[in-house]
Image (tube, rainbow, N blue to C red):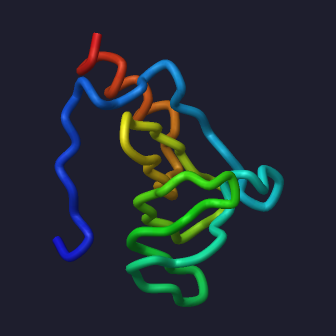
Amino acid sequence: MFYGRSIAIEDIKVNDIKQVDLHNERDYGIKWRTNGIGLPHYQVGWMQLNNGNKALVYLTDKTKVVLIPTNNYDVLISTDDFTGITEELHKTIN
C-alpha cells in the first residue's frame, strides 16, 4: 500500500471518533497536501488540516467521513458505514 500505515490499537482515541462532513466542519478540511495525491473526488496521503493537525487521508466523498484521532495524527476516511467502522473499533479496543 503506497500510503498505508499500521496504527497500534493503543494509539487510537476510540472515544473521540466521529463522523464529519468536511463541507460543514471546516476545522477538519485540508489546508495543504504534504505528501499525497489530490484529484477531483480522490485525495490520499499526508495532509495538513485547517486546525493544524497532521492527517492521513483517504477521501472520495467529503460529506461522509470518519475521523479517527490517534496519539500522533488524525485519520480521515470516506465511508458509507460509519456505524460499522466505529462498532468494530470499539469491540477491538475495549
Q: Is residue 74 above or below residue 85?
A: below
Q: Is residue 43 above or below residue 65?
A: below
Residue 86: quadrant of the picture: top left
Of the 4 image quadrants, the one containing the N terminus is bottom left
Give x and y (percent) for residue 50: 69, 60
Taking the spot 53% from the left edge, 89% from the top edge, the residue there is 39
- Closest to the observer, 85 or 17: 17
Is 75 on the left or on the right of 24, as rendered? left
Question: Which residue is farthest front?
Answer: 52
Taking the spot 71% from the left edge, 58% from the top edge, the residue there is 22
- The answer to whether residue 16 of the structure is visible from this angle is yes
Taking the spot 22% from the left edge, 28% from the top edge, the residue there is 9
Q: Is residue 13 above or below residue 48?
A: above
- Closest to the observer, 3 or 71: 71
Give x and y (percent) for residue 11: 29, 30
Of the 4 image quadrants, the one containing the C terminus is top left
Residue 32: quadrant of the picture: bottom right
Give x and y (percent) for residue 6: 17, 49
